[in-house]
Amino acid sequence: SYELTQPPSVSVSPGQTARITCSGDALPRQFAYWYQQKPGQAPVLVTYKDSERPSGIPERFSGSSSGTIATLTISGVQAEDEADYYCQSLDSNAPLFGGGTKLTVL
Amino acid sequence: QVQLVQSGAEVKKPGASVKVSCKASGYTFTSYDINWVRQATGQGLEWMGWMNPNSGNTGYAQKFQGRVTMTRNTSTSTAYMELSTLRSEDTAVYYCAKVFEKAQDAFDIWGQGTMVTVSS
């Protein structure tokens, strides 16, 4: 079955740039969406349609997609960005989530 | 403000059913689909299905076909998700989520989550 593959963990120092990838064969044809989830909280949409940002999301969050890889980039990482990040796309018109990536801010 | 408020935690025995509610406020309930997503402890997000609050039309993930029912009460702007024949693997936090106006394949407003524990 179709899967979206993310690295289990990414670590970065404050002020540096974090890049979280999401791999999926259908990504050339389907948009990618990214969510941030902090412990005990519901997910928050941080980017949509590959590279758009909802209102209220800081500019340091950006998305991109090329071929079968979608990437969430967090520039100038802050301690508050430590969280789990999930990509989401579609599989036969049904939402599908990646396995999640834990971002650790060192 | 736009929000979804879910019902409280539930403890159920294997084989029982659970019905979780999701009350919408701050927007026109019938204008946006409601989806349900669950998350087992320490695990990722799993999509369960969608419901159109205007028509009542639904679509369920294949995994949950025959066990899940999504309904709504438009007079109270409340969506419901009922899961039957519960087993221990159904222990999870269940979220309702509203589709995003600018991208209806994404979810911009989520409920706070409802913990469902299945245990004998």
Image (cartoon, coloured by chain):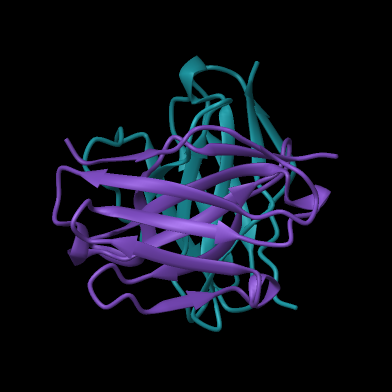
Front residue (pair A46, B74): B74
- From this view, report whether residue A21 is shown above or below residue B120: below
Please provide percent x and percent y for residue A42: 48, 36
Which residue shows up at 44% across the image and 25% down it?
Answer: A76
Front residue (pair A34, B7): B7
Please provide percent x and percent y for residue B59: 48, 77
Which residue shows up at 72% across the image and 36% down it?
Answer: B41
Please provide percent x and percent y for residue B71: 40, 66
Front residue (pair B18, A73): B18
Which residue shows up at 32% across the image and 71% down it?
Answer: B52
Residue A78 visible in rendering: no
Residue A58 picture quarter: top left
In the picture, which quadrant includes the N terminus of chain B?
Answer: top left
Which residue shows up at 30% across the image and 36% down it?
Answer: A57
Chain in cyan in the render: A
Of all residues, the one furthest to the right in this rendering is: B120
Residue B80 picture quarter: bottom left
Front residue (pair A78, B27): B27
- From this view, report whether residue B58 is shown above or below residue A100: below
Please provide percent x and percent y for residue A66: 51, 68
Chain B rendering hue: purple
Q: Is residue B113 left or right of residue B24?
A: right
